[in-house]
Amino acid sequence: MSLVEAIARLQEADRALNAADPKPFPVPLAGLEAVVAGSVLALERGDWWVPGLRERVGAVLREVPLERIADGLKGARPYRIAPPTPAPALRALHAVGLALADREHAALVHLGIGSAADGAFHEALNLAALLRPNVLFMVAVHPLGDDAPLGPQLAASPADLARAFGIPATEVDGNDVVAVRDAVAAARSAGGPALIEARLVPGSPPG
């Protein structure tokens, strides 16, 4: 499947999923298509994928039937897709655990800037730095506008935080699916923990 086909499939599945009124509530993917498509296509079949409610529609790129992911609180076995957690930052700790439990494969977790401000994210970085599993932290960074419900939550960027723990970090254009895929593939091949900071520009088409 090409990257263009993957984005088109994601958008079609996203419309169908949200029309079905998924549990616990509709969470449109809009703006994250390139981040999700690039991430999923860079992983191998045996790798764990730990999405949030917004990213979970990407399971269709692993051939998961849409009706199987309509309940966002369930995982998808045997596709190695973990269910979203009540507290988003806990996904980071779960991903570290999954990568530790299976050293032959990687685990990629999706996070947002709010999750990166949570203590669980910092705990996950610390554990990853200590134990060096092949865990990939994909952090999508949306610029905050005047209508944002919360102001800045981090004193440093996610990439700088990772580097402070001794974890390699890369910054990419989150609207560029090729850049995302290549960054994830390179981090996965390197082994050990890594963080990819995907910076998003609202209104920019994925491509």
Image (cartoon, helix red, strand yellow):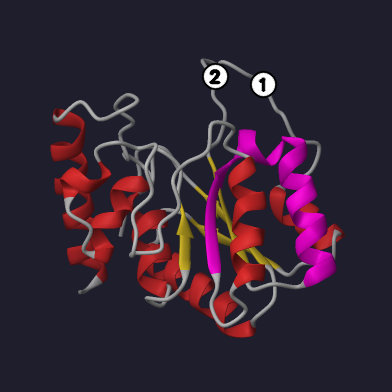
Residue 68: percent from left, percent from top: 22, 47
Q: Which mark is residue 31?
A: none
**Is residue 61 visible in the rendered structure shown here?**
yes
Extent of the magenta region: 107-131
Q: Could you tell me the amino acid type at mark 2? A: Ala
Please state, as top left, top right, bottom left or bottom right, where the N terminus lies in the image. Answer: bottom left
Q: Nearer the viewer, residue 128 or 195?
A: 128
Q: Is residue 170 magenta?
A: no
Q: Residue at x 64, y 73 (%)?
A: 134
User: Residue 102's image quarter?
Assistant: bottom right
Q: Is residue 63 above or below residue 46?
A: above
Q: Nearer the viewer, residue 181 or 110?
A: 110
Q: Is residue 123 magenta?
A: yes
Q: Could you tell me the amino acid type at mark 1? A: Gly
Residue 13: percent from left, percent from top: 17, 47
Q: Is residue 203 above or below residue 133?
A: above
Please state, as top left, top right, bottom left or bottom right, where the C terminus lies in the image. Answer: bottom left
Q: In the image, is 190 to the left or to the right of 121?
A: left
Which residue is the site of mark 1? 151
**Is residue 205 visible in the rendered structure shown here?**
no
Q: Are marks 2 and 1 in contact (CB under 8 Å)?
A: yes
Q: Residue at x 76, y 56 (%)?
A: 125
Residue 15: percent from left, percent from top: 16, 38
Q: CA distance from mark 2 to mark 1?
A: 7 Å
